[in-house]
């Protein structure tokens, strides 16, 4: 068909013009630029990879630091729970003492967004103290949290707390 031949001829004409333009550009550019351009691309690419590696390393360092702080806070709360088991049993206010300790901890460390203290009751996790007072008395159905509490582990994971990315 005549239209097919026209289209092929136009493509050949375009490719011929493009080839000619590239040859002219090649002839016009000094050899220094021709050699330096690939090196510049490598330098920019290498710098980008280096920056990305540094960023990830720094993010991991920050995460490790926050996990370390969370572990220390968890140990502090664990100590408070142990003390309240003894004192609370004598005074009849076990969970109230733990809650007062968490409230005091939050008052001196406002960067803490959430702490939940659980107790296993009838195979379920009952929240006995929390930075979210509305959560006290609620049941946590996360099986991973239940296993962690049963094994006396402090756990952390990334989450959004009030639309803020946080280590929980």
Image: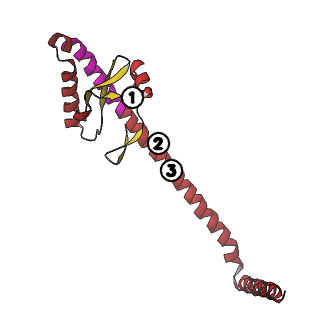
Please give left or right for residue 92 compared with residue 65 in the image. Answer: left
Rendered image: mark on residue 111:
none
> Which label's residue is closer to the chain start, 2 or 1?
2
> Which label's residue is closer to the chain start, 1 or 3?
3
Report the residue marked by disc 1: 141
Q: Closer to the observer: label 2 or label 1?
A: 1
Residue that appears at 47% across and 42% down = 60
Mark 3 is surrounded, within 10 Å at the Cα level, by few (under 14), some (14 to 19) or many (20 or more) other residues, namely few
Report the residue marked by disc 3: 54
Residue that appears at 39% across and 41% down = 159
Report the residue marked by disc 2: 60
Mark 2 is surrounded, within 10 Å at the Cα level, by few (under 14), some (14 to 19) or many (20 or more) other residues, namely few
Residue at the limit of the structure toward the left, as seen here: 91
Q: Closer to the observer: label 1 or label 3?
A: 1
* Residue 85 falls within the magenta-colored stretch: yes
> Which label's residue is closer to the chain start, 3 or 2?
3
x then y, percent, for residue 124: 36, 21
Q: Is mark 2 on a helix, strand or loop?
A: helix
x then y, percent, for residue 16: 79, 86
């Amino acid at each position: 068909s005549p239209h097919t031949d026209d289209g092929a001829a136009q493509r050949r004409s375009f490719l011929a013009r493009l080839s000619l333009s590239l040859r002219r550009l090649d002839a016009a550019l000094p050899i220094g630029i021709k050699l330096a351009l690939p090196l510049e691309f490598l330098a920019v690419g290498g710098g980008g990879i280096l920056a990305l590696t540094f960023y990830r390393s720094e993010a991991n360092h920050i995460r490790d630091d926050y996990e370390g702080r969370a572990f220390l806070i968890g140990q502090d709360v664990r100590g408070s729970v142990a003390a309240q088991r003894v004192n609370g049993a004598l005074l009849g206010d076990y969970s109230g003492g733990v809650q007062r300790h968490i409230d005091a901890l939050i008052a001196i460390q406002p960067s803490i967004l959430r702490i939940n203290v659980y107790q296993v009751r009838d195979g379920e996790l009952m929240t006995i103290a929390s930075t979210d007072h509305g959560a006290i008395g609620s049941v946590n159905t996360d099986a991973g949290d239940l296993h962690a509490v049963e094994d006396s582990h402090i756990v952390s994971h990334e989450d959004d707390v009030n639309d803020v990315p946080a280590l929980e």
